Amino acid sequence: MKNNRDPDRTRSRILAAATQDFARHGLGGARVDRIAARAGANKRMLYYYFGSKDDLFLAALEESYAQIRNAERALDLEHRDPREAIKRLVEFTWDYYLGHPEFMTLLGSENLHEGRHVRRSRRVRELHTPLVQTLRGILRRGEREGLFRKGVDPVQLYISIAGEGYFYLSNRYTLSRIFGRDLVARRALGARARHIVAMVLNALRR
């Protein structure tokens, strides 16, 4: 096939197929044969491009992180009012989790392995540096304008923003049963987004 002679396209197909399989089955349950078949490739090509199943998993993680970080950069947060910038980031993070459940499941799988793959990835660390710098700039502008309190750690802030959505969605079924609410109904999801925005902005208020 012509596509198989296009290295970039073949590699992209393998990576996309692997991301789906890892997201559905986790690192332990994913199968190289299944990934290769889904990508329309063979195992030899998979090992040629990625080296091993663990290296392929890391590549899927890196690409998933790159996608969300690239999408964040398109928000142009640096040129927004500080409060609007935080609100937009919170809403974006929530919407991204809803639209990309595979990202959450990949992170869950990696945490089961105690982060041993991302630990050896320089790319993942480099991808997150601009995010921290952007948040630091927004916080400082908010301080200067008398909108935000002083001394907020941008890393802690982002972890809180991400965690508020991640915990809710990753535990939505148990929480729905425990509290007798349909937490994935459209109205409930909208209410949760508004709650997170209000809580984060209130926490930053001077």
Image (spheres, grey):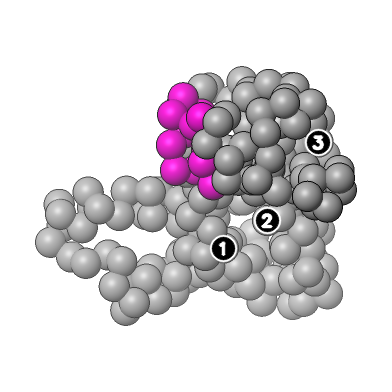
Residue type, numbered disc 2: Ile
Q: Amino acid at mark 3?
A: Arg
- Residue at image x 57%, y 29%? 32
Secondary element under disc 1, as helix, strand or loop, is helix
Read off the residue under disc 3.
Answer: 123
Is residue 118 visible from the viewing direction of this image?
A: no
How many C-alpha atoms fall within 10 Å of the one at disc 2: few (<14), some, or many (≥20)?
some
Q: Does the CB distance between marks 1 and 3 fall below 8 Å?
A: no
Q: Contact, CB < 8 Å: mark 1 with mark 2?
A: yes
Disc 1 residue crowd, few under 14, some 14–19, many 20+, Cα 10 Å: some
The chief SS type of the magenta part is helix
List x then y, in percent, for residue 193: 44, 70
Indicate which disc, 1 or 2, sits on the residue closer to the N terminus.
2
How far across and how far down the image is residue 46, in percent? Answer: 71, 31
Q: Which span is picked out in magenta?
A: 19-31
Q: Give, as a three-letter code, the residue at label 1.
A: Tyr
Q: Secondary structure at mark 2?
A: helix
Element under disc 3:
helix
